[in-house]
Image (cartoon, grey):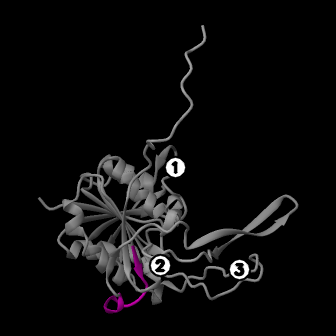
């Protein structure tokens, strides 16, 4: 039986990377359905949110080169839950989320809607992969943003979405045979496929590629900006290897309990 893949993202159903990834998965021999937010839903993590009309989540059916495509008024994680409930046909065997516009690297993956969708799939023991394209440009400076280097993302039309899709497709056979609930976090340099130096297993950097900064604090309001982190790169981490031109892959998992921590002893209930 042909494995069934749900392709989703947090950049919205019209994002070009979403369609590149869906086509790459179909060309690799998988059955593919696409369901993604109608509007951009970046930074949603694993939030289960939706916009309803009369208590109903709205689905807009599209068609793209023979693929079933749904625009959904919901967050990426919510869409994964809906897929598991059979809303878009048979529940998926694999979930692909992305490619995100910008790397999802380091411990900042906690906040990513792209990664949140993949981790939500793992909660139902579905294998998943979050895919991101490293497109951030730290060279531009916004003088209003605390004097730091503000993240500037080039226009979608010049980005190498097909590179991210090809690298992700190359991991599908491995992921299909991995233990249930396996999640991969894949980051790919924004360059032609032949210029990627290879795929390397990486640790999570202790920070993200960008950080929130306070740009303005006024009476009754604040304004924030997103800036380049500026922290030193840790050898072997995803951010360090991306900077060297490698695609990086890291196995991650949903939150779980921590062992070995001494906690206060439980007290008997008072009578």
Pair 3/1: label in front: 3
Image quarter hosting the N terminus: bottom left
Give the label on residue 52, or none.
Answer: 1
Q: Quick one: SS at disc 2?
A: helix
Q: Is residue 231 visible?
A: yes
Image quarter hosting the C terminus: top right
Expressed as whole percent of the image width and height from the top left, the position of residue 39 reads: 52, 65
10 or 163, nearer to the observer: 163
Along the polypeptide, which appears first: circle 3 or circle 1?
Answer: 1
Q: Are marks 1 and 2 in contact (CB under 8 Å)?
A: no
Q: Quick one: SS at disc 1?
A: strand
Q: Are marks 2 and 3 in contact (CB under 8 Å)?
A: no
Expressed as whole percent of the image width and height from the top left, the position of residue 147 reads: 75, 80
Measured along the vertical axis of the image, is residue 192 above or below residue 106? below
Pair 1/2: label in front: 2
Q: Is residue 41 visible?
A: no
Residue topped by disc 2: 240
Give the label on residue 148, or none.
Answer: 3
The residue lying at 24 percent from left, 56 percent from top is 93
Query: Distance of mark 2 from mark 3, alpha carbons?
Result: 20 Å
Q: Are marks 3 and 1 in contact (CB under 8 Å)?
A: no
């Amino acid at each position: 039986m042909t494995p069934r893949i749900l392709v989703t993202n947090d950049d919205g159903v019209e994002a070009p990377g979403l369609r590149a990834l869906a086509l790459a998965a179909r060309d690799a021999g998988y059955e593919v359905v696409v369901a993604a937010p109608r509007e951009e839903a970046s930074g949603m993590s694993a939030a289960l949110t939706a916009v309803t009309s009369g208590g109903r989540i709205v689905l807009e059916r599209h068609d793209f080169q023979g693929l079933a495509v749904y625009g959904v008024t919901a967050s990426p994680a919510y869409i994964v839950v809906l897929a598991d409930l059979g809303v878009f046909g048979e529940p998926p065997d694999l979930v692909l989320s992305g490619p995100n516009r910008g790397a999802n690297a380091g411990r900042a993956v906690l906040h990513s809607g792209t990664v949140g969708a993949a981790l939500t799939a793992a909660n139902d023991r579905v294998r998943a992969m979050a895919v991101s394209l490293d497109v951030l440009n730290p060279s531009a400076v916004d003088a209003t943003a605390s004097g730091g280097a503000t993240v500037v993302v080039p226009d979608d039309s010049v980005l190498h979405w097909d590179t991210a899709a090809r690298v992700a497709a190359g991991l599908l056979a491995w992921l299909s045979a991995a233990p249930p609930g396996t999640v991969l976090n894949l980051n790919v340099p924004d360059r032609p496929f032949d210029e990627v130096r290879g795929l390397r297993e990486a640790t999570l950097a202790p920070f993200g590629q960008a950080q929130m900064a306070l740009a303005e604090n006024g009476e009754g309001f604040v304004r924030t900006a997103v800036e380049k982190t500026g922290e030193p790169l840790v050898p072997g981490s995803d951010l360090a290897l991306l900077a060297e031109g490698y695609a990086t892959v890291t196995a991650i998992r949903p939150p779980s309990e921590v062992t070995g921590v001494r906690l206060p002893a439980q007290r008997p209930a008072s009578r």
